[in-house]
Amino acid sequence: MTDALKRLSDEGVAIWLDDLSRKRITSGNLAELIDQQHVVGVTTNPSIFQKAISQGDGYDQQLSDLAAREVTVEEAIRMITTADVRDAADILRPVFDATGGQDGRVSIEVDPRLAHNTKATTAEARQLAWLVDRPNTLIKIPATEAGIPAIAETIGLGISVNVTLIFSLERYRKVMDAYLTGLEKAKAAGLDLSEIHSVASFFVSRVDTEIDKRLDGIGTDEAKALKGKAALANARLAYQAYEEVFSSDRWAALDRAGANKQRPLWASTGVKDPAYKDTLYVEDLVAPGTVNTMPEATLEATADHGNITGNTIAGTYEQARAELDAVEKLGISYDDVVRLLEDEGVDKFEASWNDLLKSTEAELKRLAPSEA
């Protein structure tokens, strides 16, 4: 078998796993993926934790202890999720050390119910960084309007951030601006910029899902010919924006002070439409200095039959712009699509958080000590 994941890594794409569970940690599976599948990071979200906690008995001992202490369900969730992130961070620590802090990272998300509250998001980010207490943690903050100033504040405190739920090019530019603002604040406070890292999670497959649905509704040959192109075009233009910002004079001053670039991270890379190749959002988004966080199925598919042919973003910007323009000319509003996707993204994470609350509460009741 050819090693497609190694070729991907050699092209400058950091491979992160979009999943975590206690079983994955304790069974040695995570260590195995790091050792054999070139995995150099982990991302989590409320959906991932909800699934992990509701399946199997891996959390029973901790849940039993938490039930005996009669903690609130919110505290129980924080104790459980930060324990997993801490343990995963320890497993990835050698990667962190070997890459000078670039990789070996584990992400944990702020409570999504705070997505529209700047002050609460910043406070939660500080609390999570303190709770996990590992230098290779990234705190995930959504790129909502309220999230943008929270990103700048959190970076300014010296806390590394994974900015999540980015769909639009305009919002992505605001995210990069917030990162640079945060670095400037950190520099003014005398912090070591070399220790602050960030990725910007640009969501991919959901863009095709929504735009393809609208193209199907139009139904013309012209519309059908554009299916499966918008998400890649959007991501490629995001990389163009990244190249512009991180070659600017503003960035050069921070670079001289030891700052790290905020890498683009391709998220939502599992293919939703079975008509598309299951490695589409891996093979066609290869460029140096990027991260691709994959569900395990996508990781396995890439390892099995991925075809990595080198940089597949360079030289595509003109075509990508033309493809998005063609979609717009058919009457599909880009602004409307990305606004809807952001709103749905926040709603989905809130719903997952609420499901996590319910299932954790049920487990606490099940494992509560019986009355003497």
Image (cartoon, helix red, strand yellow):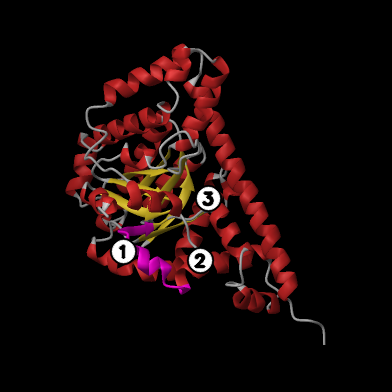
Residue at image x 73%, y 76%?
A: 368
Residue tagged by mark 3?
A: 121
Snapshot quadrant of residue 115: top right
242 to 219, vertically: above or below: below
34 to 252, vertically: above or below: below
Residue at image x 20%, y 35%?
A: 249
Of label 1 and label 2, which has the lower sequence position?
A: 1
Residue tagged by mark 1?
A: 36
Query: Which of the two marks, 1 or 3, is nearer to us in this view?
Result: 1
Apparent side of residue 112 relative to residue 269 in the rendered image (left or right): right
Helix, strand or loop at label 2? It is helix
Residue tagged by mark 2?
A: 82
Helix, strand or loop at label 3? It is helix
**Residue 71: x %, y % from top left:** 68, 71
Of label 1 and label 3, which has the lower sequence position?
A: 1
Residue farthest front in this picture: 1
Residue 131 visible in the picture: no
| Quadrant of the snapshot with the N terminus | bottom left
